[in-house]
Structure formats: structure tokens, C-alpha cells
Image: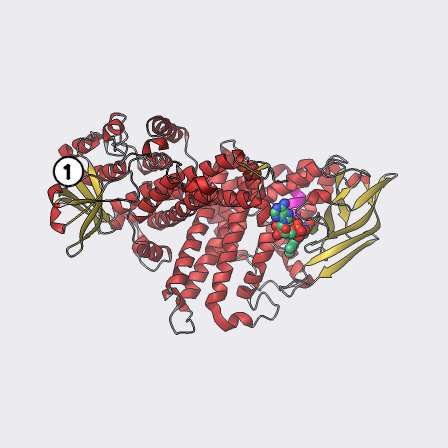
Amino acid sequence: MDLHYSAEDDAFRAQARGWLRDNIPRERRPAHGEAAAQFDRDWQRRLFEHGWAGLNWPAEYGGLGLSAIQQVIWYEECARAGAPHYINTTYVALMHAGPTIIACGTPAQKTFHLPRILAGESLWCQGFSEPNAGSDLASLKTAGVIDGDELVVNGSKTWTTDGQHADFQELLIRTEPGSARHKGLTWVICDMRAPGITVQPIRTMLGDAHVNTTFYDDVRIPLANVVGEPGGGWKTAMSTLAFERGTGFIGDQLALYERVNRAIALAGRTRLADGRLAIDDSDIAGRLALIKADTLAIKAMTFAQISEIRQGGNPGPKGSIMKLMVTSTAKALSHLVAEIVGWEFMEYNDDRNDHPLTYDYLWSWVYTIAGGTSEIQREIIADQLLQLPRSR
Amino acid sequence: MLLVPDASEQEIAATAAAFLAAEFPLARLHGARADHDRLGEFAALGWLGLSAPEANGGSGLGVIEEMLFFYELGRVAGPVGVLAQVLAIAAAGDERELCAALIAGETPVALVVQRSEEAGIRFVGAADRGYALEVTPAGATLFAVRGGDCTEVPCLDRSVRMHTGPASALEQRLHVAGDRLWYRAQVAVSAMLVGTAECAQDMTVAYAKVRETFGRPIGAYQAVRHPCADMAMRIEGARCQLYYAATALQEQQADARLHVDAARLLADRAAKANTDANIQLHGGIGVTEEFDAHLLLKRANLLWRLFGASQHRMRTLLGLDDAAEGLAHGEDA
Ligand SMILES: Cc1cc2nc3c(=O)[nH]c(=O)nc-3n(C[C@H](O)[C@H](O)[C@H](O)COP(=O)(O)OP(=O)(O)OC[C@H]3O[C@@H](n4cnc5c(N)ncnc54)[C@H](O)[C@@H]3O)c2cc1C
């Protein structure tokens, strides 16, 4: 084992650091709405114009084709520089839709969509979950019926993050009448401007409305928009989910480290009700130390996973361990910070920029629910890593 | 950058695992008053001198290989005397004769776990012959033991012997200043703790597949499956951090201490929580003397008390000390 970066990687780090220093936006990202989406598009365009778009995309599709280790370096430098967070309205396009089209798309789909995604011209959303199909995604019912060279879609999707800004949607629907579970599903590219689509915001406890319910009323989608095989949508969808649980969160994994250090600094200057500094409270200090240890371990796990992939292994269910560990550590951290900050925490005005600590606290549940709940991650670990008898 | 064992490291771990599985099955610990350290067997295969310099009769390997060996030792709740021996060899340094005797396993070493003028001493290991080693953040001290002055006391972990005595029962033989051995000890004991945690997990998972209640294996119940998944998560985090820490220490990285302290914290947690869950998820059989689960619980209790000073660890991790500044300075601190 060794912790050395190659000279090439060191040079890459220096280059990334220099570029970020000179190019990260001076103004803050607006908290909500179209202004926030525009900020994300602009930042993506800037990355694109300077050759930093599509870190993990193969070069033949306009990406950088960076090694996993250089992706880690990039995200470390972003966290260090305080660059705009990559989990924003461009996330689904860059981290899900693009990679899925690269893996399963037709040449025409690639030619049309990939350059637009890289340049920040098109935003995407994900239409998988339904009111009655979340953890049990395979029970989804939104249906598409073939009519000539089109699919006619009826039904509804929910929790559509940033659906109000999206140009396109990754839509998973049932296209074989009477089919059950994983069979008979199809993954299609849905134009969010198509007639028959209604996007209805859902207000969340965070005080924003970044998720939506999407209704489909005789929405016509060309069959040419099917990605992968018609009826083979589950396979196409899994290539996306595996990605999300594997490497899709590298940036968040690494950003936790900076967050913990900021929390330690906060505890070092914040006085508790009894006048002592928070860091001098042994309970707070003990919990902070353990959270920091977990954060270091998450970094080490990232390196171990990358090393395993490089040696030809497949981290598989370890991605679920990672999601469980990252989200539970982030939750423990934001809850401890909530205890440290006292009454200021309560002055929340629904603006994440004004009250990031309260926002992080409220967000912690989104983290442990969206993208597969913690309970479902434990199920995957039990099934696939520990090979325990199935519970269902 | 590589954070999984390479081919030669894997081979060392596999060789250790095969030897330990064959010679030190957990079953050996039942009924035995104290597990014999059998240092000679470890010596014969070269394990004691694994990381001692070749000039001193060792194999000249490093912290990483040592960590992998202790991980495997932890998985079988192996003799704690081996840990004391390996650390004493490192302390003996260039004292050729002493080093040779220790590497040959002829002179056993106990671990001093408490020492003060008023309260006297406590050590884990045999009292009749040999040495006792104390490792603190300030330095490591090897003592000759006057066994006659000491009293054997019972130990919850029946596989080890424990003695108390007056401070005067120890006579200083050599002292190495600095925290170099302290951090080596932390890596080794962390490795044993994570090995113990993994053994507990394997035991639970194996039982969950075969024990049936209400017509189903208990491993199909989420109240059993989810604690098993948590065991796996604790091990994965602790193991990866341990790999990182051992490698950072081996390479004398500036933040190596920070990483070792984090590894130790996570190893403690994994061993405590996993040996606990292992008993709970076995039901009644889990609390019997006949079954193995209590052996791991008691071993974890011994290990997490070794090289304690969790206050020190917390401060390093929170950056409240400049202790994490750099190994090179610490060498002669
Ligand atoms: C803020 C937010 C954004 C989201 N964004 C998107 C998006 O953009 N696109 C999209 O498609 N989806 C999105 N989701 C949906 C998300 O993936 C689902 O909410 C999640 O998978 C859980 O499904 P559910 O809400 O239906 O809960 P349910 O599946 O009904 O679960 C309810 C509870 O039961 C538990 N549970 C369920 N099944 C089991 C089981 N077998 N064993 C043990 N426990 C179980 C769950 O862990 C949970 O605690 C988002 C969700 C949130 C909250």
C-alpha cells in the first residue's frame, strides 16, 4: 500500500487549484428558483469553456476521462476552494443521464444530448419514483402505450428534484401491459416541454419547493427516445443507480472533511449557555472527534474503493456501505452543530444562504431517504455483501 | 496511491491467517486457565521479528506488514504476549543480544498497563521470567520484573494472566524517548481490535443463516439483518482507516498521528459494538461459557483498555495539540 501521488497527479492538482482560485464565482449562489438554476448553468458553461466539464466522461464523448484518483483530487480542490457545489441542478444531467446515454444510448441520442449536457445548456431531472413506488421501485405503474412510432404516457411521478427547471427527464415507465416488477419497463428521454406534462411543486420542511410531482396526460414521446431496449428499462436504470451508489457521491464524501473542520472551529469559538466554550464540553468534543474519525475513514474508504476498481475488482455492495456511512455521518455532524449553535439556529427564514447550519440539519433527512433509504442500503448490504437469507 | 494490500502484502496476511487458523482456533480458549503464548512457534516462523531490521536478526518489513499480521492475530483472539514481544523488539533497537533473545521468543515480555509510586503496578502477562514493557506517548520503557514481589490476580479474559505488585518490582532496563513506539502500538492494537470485530461479525452472520425461528432463518428478519449490516459498516470504516494510518506511519507522513488516532477510535468502537451485537443476536447460547462469543467480548475489553489515553487521542483529532505536527520532530521529543 502507498499514499503517494504520481508527479502527473501532483501537476493536475496544481493546475486545478490554480484554475479554481482564479475562476470560482465571487457572488453567492441564489438559494432558490430560476436564478439558482441560471447560476448552475453559467458555472457549468464556464467549466465547459475552460475544459473542466465531464470529469468522468470518456474523452470520445467530450469528457476529460480522468482517472478516479484525479476525480478525487478535483473534488478535494473544489471543497478546499469553496467552489459551487456539484450537487445542483446540473447533477442529474452530468452524473446520471449523461453516463446512462453513454452506456446505453443510440448514436443520435449521444450526438444530440451529450454536448448540450456538458455545456450546461440542458438540465435534466429523474422520473423514477411514484407516489406508490419508492423503495419498491419495481412496483411502478406509470404506463406508456405504443402508438405508431410514439409512446403515449399516462400517470404520475413524484419527488422529481428540480423538475421545474429541467429540459429533459429520465423517465422510467411500464410499456408492456400486464407486466410485473422488473419486466416490461422502459427508460425514455422525456421532453419536459411536451404537451400534457404538469409539474406541481411540493413544499418541503426545508421551506423550499425543489421537488415536484409530475403528471403525464397523454404525453407523446417518440420511440426514438428509448434508451436501451424497449422492455429492458430496469437494466438501463440500474446502470444509473449503481453509478449513484458507487462513485456518484465522491465529491460529497470528500466535502465532509471540510465541514467537520468548520464545525470544530465553530465549537472552538461558540459559548454554551453556561459560558463554557463548546469544545471544552467533553460530550461535544467526544462526538466531534468520532465524527472526524468517521470522515477520515470515509476518505480512506474512497481510496480503497478506487484501488479495488483499479485492481479489477467491483466494489458492488460497498457502495451501499459508503452511502450509509456518508449520510449517517453527515446527519450526526449537522445535529451536533445544531446543539452547539443555540438560539441562532432557530432564526431560520427558509433561506439556506442565511442559515446554512439549520439548512444542513433539515437536509440530513433528505440525505438518508433520497437515492435509496438507509434501511434499503442495509438490506442491500445484508443480501449482497453478507449473503444473508432474503427478507422479502 | 494504493489502499488495498498489494500481492506481497496479501501473501503475508494469507500466510499468517493459515498458520493462526490451524494452530490457534478459538476452541483452544475453552477451559484453559491461560492461553500459552507459544512464542517459540511464532519465532520459528519469523513472525516476532517481522519488522525488526535485518541487521538485528529481523525480516526488515514495515508497519504495514505488522498491521496485517496483528489483524489476523485479532481474528483468532491470538496471544497478547505476541504484541508485547513485537513492541519490546522495537524498543530494544540496536541492543543486539537482547534483540536476538526477544526475536527468538526465549525471553517473554509482559505489558505494563498501570504504574504509579502509590498505587503500584499492574501488568498483563507472565511474572516469573523476563521483562515488562510500558508504552506511553512520552516513551517506551523496558523493565526487568522481580516476579517474587508480584501477585497474580484474576482476569476477565481468562486467556491472559494478570499481576499486580509494588512499583519497586520493576527495574528499568532501557528507555526510548518519543512517541514512535506509542503509535506503532496503536496501529497494532487497532488491528487486533478490528480483527476481533470481524470475527464477531462472521460468527453472527454464520449463525443467522442456520438458526431458524418461526419457520425462517433469523437472518431473514430485519431486526437481525440490519445490525449485521451495521457491523459490516463499522468494520469497513475501521479497516480502511487502519490501512491508511499504517501506510501514513510507514511513510512518515506529516499527519500520520492524526490518522492513527482516528483508526484507534474507530477500532475501539467496532470491537465494542460488534462483540456486543454478536452475543445479543445469538440469543441464549450467546451467554454460555461453552460458546465462543464471550471470548471475543472479553478480549475486546482487554484490548480497548491497552494504551488508553483517549483524552490524548481526542485532542489530536480535534487539532487542539500540535502533537499532529510531524513525525520527524516526535522522534526525539
Ligand atoms: C428530497 C427528495 C428528493 C428526491 N428526488 C428524487 C428524484 O429526483 N427522482 C426520483 O425518482 N426520486 C426521488 N426521490 C425519491 C426517493 O428515492 C424515495 O423517497 C426513496 O427511495 C424512498 O421511497 P418512499 O419515499 O416511497 O418511501 P417508502 O418506500 O414508502 O419507505 C417508507 C419507510 O419504510 C422503509 N422501508 C421501505 N421498504 C423497506 C424494506 N423492504 N425494508 C425495510 N424498510 C423499508 C423506508 O426505509 C422508509 O423508512 C427523492 C426523495 C426525496 C425525499
What's the image's color scheme? secondary structure
Where does the N terminus of chain B fall, quadrant-wise?
A: top left
Q: Is residue A42 visible?
A: yes
What residue is rendered at 70% in x and 49% in y? A129
* Residue A385 rendering spot, x and y as whole percentages: 53, 37
* Residue B58 rendering spot, x and y as whole percentages: 23, 30
Disc count in the image? 1
Front residue of B179/A389: it is A389
What residue is rendered at 42% in x and 58% in y? A287
* Residue B61 rendering spot, x and y as whole percentages: 29, 33
Is ligand 1 less than 8 Å from the beta carbon at label 1? Answer: no
SS class of the residue under badge 1? loop
Would residue A158 appear left or right of A51 to someone viewing this image?
right
Q: Is B63 situated above or below A87?
A: above
Would residue B330 appear left or right of A82 to someone viewing this image?
left
Front residue of A310/A218: it is A218
For badge 1, the amino acid type reads: Asp
> Magenta includes A180?
no
Q: Is residue A71 visible?
A: no
Picture quadrant of residue A23 = bottom right
Which stretch is magenta? Answer: A92-99
Front residue of B11/B221: it is B221
Q: Is A207 situated above or below B186?
A: below
Q: Which residue is mark 1?
A: B128
Chain letter for mark 1: B
Residue that lies at the very extreme toward the right in this rendered image? A148
Would residue A318 appear left or right of A187 to someone viewing this image?
left
* Residue B36 rendering spot, x and y as whole percentages: 25, 33
Would residue B203 appear left or right of A92 to someone viewing this image?
left
User: What secondary structure prevails in the magenta region?
Assistant: helix
What residue is rendered at 73% in x and 49% in y? A169
- Count residues near mark 1 (Cα–Cα under 10 Å), then give few for <14, some for 14-19, many for 20+: few
